[in-house]
Image: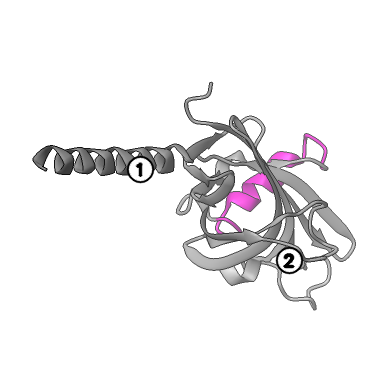
Amino acid sequence: MKTIILSAISAVTMLWAGCKTDEISQKQVYVLNEETSVAEWKGAMPDNANTGSFAVKSKDLEVENGKVTGGSFIIPIASIKNFNLPDAVKPQLLEHLKSADFFNMAVHPEAAFKITKVQPYTGRDTAAIAGANFLVTGDFTMIGKTNSLTFPAKIDVNEKNLKTEAKFSIDRTKWGMTYATDPKAEGHYIYNDVAIHLKLDGTRKGSE
């Protein structure tokens, strides 16, 4: 009888351990490639627009059963680039964007997005990236303020790679960026909405 009980306990223990191992093996962490992961931006005025990008960094994007479930990414403000202006003019714009009028980089050197929810997306938002299959929600912190942000994204994950792409807009004034927001100021007015094109490219940790 004692032998039978011990055998049963052993079998249950092995089964529990096996289930636990399977559960752990399904949870994976992906690291972004900092050379190819970018957040492209477009800030517009009534008769003009500027475009550029930021680098995006992350070492903790969580994937479970082939789906992104959590993690965060960082945007270093110092990485800002401009695409459209002549090289001689770019430094003037970029230094202004880093100043207290905009990102106040000296006090807030990074912006950050922390994922709080990822759910299937079946909507038909014409502004969303083509092929969007998930709706991502998270807390976006910039210039010392945090607001919730939700956007459709196209997310593709396999055993080694993660690729995410999304298009959305943010209202910069919600984060306290109020420079040039008066539409009556001719020649000195910038629309509140900033267009973002997020492109993330990651690799599963340990698969290099």
N-term-proximal mark, 2 vs 1: 1
Residue 92 is inside the magenta segment: yes
- Tell which residue pokes out farthest to the bottom in this image: 184
Secondary structure found at label 1? helix
Residue 23 is situated, as x and y percent measured from the top left of the image, at 42, 43
Q: Is residue 159 left or right of residue 21?
A: right
Vertical arrangement, residue 175 with respect to residue 133, above or below: below
**Kind of residue at badge 2:** Asp
Tell which of 73 and 180 is nearer to you: 73
Q: Which residues are magenta?
A: 85-103
Q: Quadrant of residue 128?
A: bottom right
- Tell which residue pokes out farthest to the left in this image: 2
Q: Dot 1, how many residues are within 10 Å of its Cα: few (below 14), some (14-19), or many (20+)?
A: few
Q: Which residue is mark 2?
A: 193
- Tell which residue pokes out farthest to the top in this image: 208
Tell which of 104 and 7 is nearer to you: 7
Secondary structure found at label 2? strand
Residue drawn at the location 63% of the way across and 65% of the way down: 150
Whether residue 91 is visible: yes
Tell which of 4 and 43 is nearer to you: 4
Q: Which mark is residue 20?
A: 1
Q: Nearer the viewer, mark 2 or mark 1?
A: 1
Residue drawn at the location 16% of the way across and 44% of the way down: 5
Residue 147 is situated, as x and y percent measured from the top left of the image, at 54, 68
